[in-house]
Image (tube, helix red, strand yellow):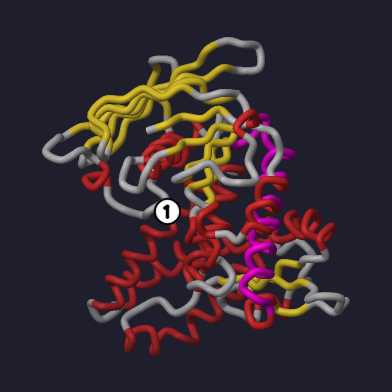
Amino acid sequence: MWLEKLRLQNFRNWQEKDFSFHQGWNLILGPNGSGKSNLLEAIYLLAQGRSPRQIRNSSLLRYQTSVAYLNAWFKNNQGAQQQLSLELRRGGKKYTWNQKTITLPALARHWGALIFLPRHLFLLHGPPQLRREFFDETMSIYSPLYRQKLSAYNHVLRQRNAWLKKGGREKEGQFWNEKLIELGAFLICQRQFLRQKLNQILASWNLKLEYCPSPRFLSQIFPPEGNWHLDEVASHLREKLHLLQEKEKLLQQTLIGPQRDDFVLWGPLGKEKELKNLTLFASRGQQRLAIIRLKLAQLNWLRAELSFAPLLLLDDLFSELDPAHQQALVNSFPRQQLIMTAVQLPPHLSPSAVNIIKL
């Protein structure tokens, strides 16, 4: 299924605007400030239920408006048209699929979107939050259950931290501890599962993903390339939480759990066969090539596992890359539907190879 048409009303800088796309590669051309990134943000919001910028609904509405409408029309493999609509208000969102209300987890069975932003080029040496987002985005597209559990975990984490700040009364704490353990163990096992699957693809480039869960000793107890069992992970989380209980009350925050996970990407440098920590030893150019391959592994795995190919969104990446890495980016991604933005036509991209939309 591919995105054929998009209509935005009162979203960001767009009062009302229609966009048409081709089934292959699409290039949005326009000066800075013209709304290119806002367009990709709208598509990602339709697919993932949130902005890639991690901001509130109120910030997505056009100035002095109270509601925005996003409507998308798709063509499936048989040529039939499908419609997705999103009504966005300050207090929430409402999705409809072919004029029937639909939940976000149910929508994930129909389509999804991946986004590659300039800040993702800092994936290896940027803050751990970026790397956790990579895990969460991938698994949320693959598994609606993961999306639900992640949302529930974040709620429990906020409540548990609030409990710690209030002094941590024992009876209430047992409830939040067990919820944190149950949901946290699930997320950790699923992230380990994803690590294994991506490594099968990354091996063709001699790259390897190391998962560093919180608490870190889990990666030493359990086999690095095997499945981790939910009950065993939960047991270790419970034991560690008990040991940290007084320290957490003192610091008034939860000190272990998926919110503190990280990963490391290992790969060769030059002609060396030994794999090195690319964050510590690779040049900026080597890191960026490895990140492109990591994102490609993410896309290829989802393409293989899902009944559809996720729409790929590239936001102004060409301006952040030197000519060699621009060429690597163009050569890397498959000929599926892709929407990218740029200020001008990238030198390594032929005008005949893309549908150009000028803003």
SS at circle 1? helix
User: Is residue 183 something that shows in the picture?
Assistant: no
Q: Is residue 129 left or right of residue 192?
A: left
Residue visible at 56% across and 80% down? 239
* The magenta stretch spans residue 160: no
Position in image of residue 169 (x %, y %): 28, 77
Q: Residue 100 or 228: which is nearer the viewer?
A: 100
Q: Amino acid at mark 1?
A: Ala
User: Is residue 27 something that shows in the picture?
Assistant: yes
Range of residues picked out in magenta: 282-310
Q: Say which quarter of the image contains residue 39.
A: top left
Residue visible at 64% across and 82% down? 280
Q: Is residue 249 above or below residue 38?
A: below
Residue visible at 42% across and 53% down? 152
Q: Is residue 216 above or below residue 131?
A: below
The 10 Å Cα crowd at callout 1, few under 14, some 14 to 19, many 20 or more, is: some
| Residue holding disc 1 | 152
Question: Can you name the residue that lies furthest to the front here?
Answer: 347
Position in image of residue 300 (x %, y %): 72, 44
Position in image of residue 265 (x %, y %): 68, 70
Quarter of the picture containing the C terminus is top left
User: What secondary structure predominates along the stretch shown in magenta?
Assistant: helix
Residue visible at 32% across and 28% down? 8
Q: Say which quarter of the image contains residue 224.
A: bottom right
* The magenta stretch spans residue 309: yes
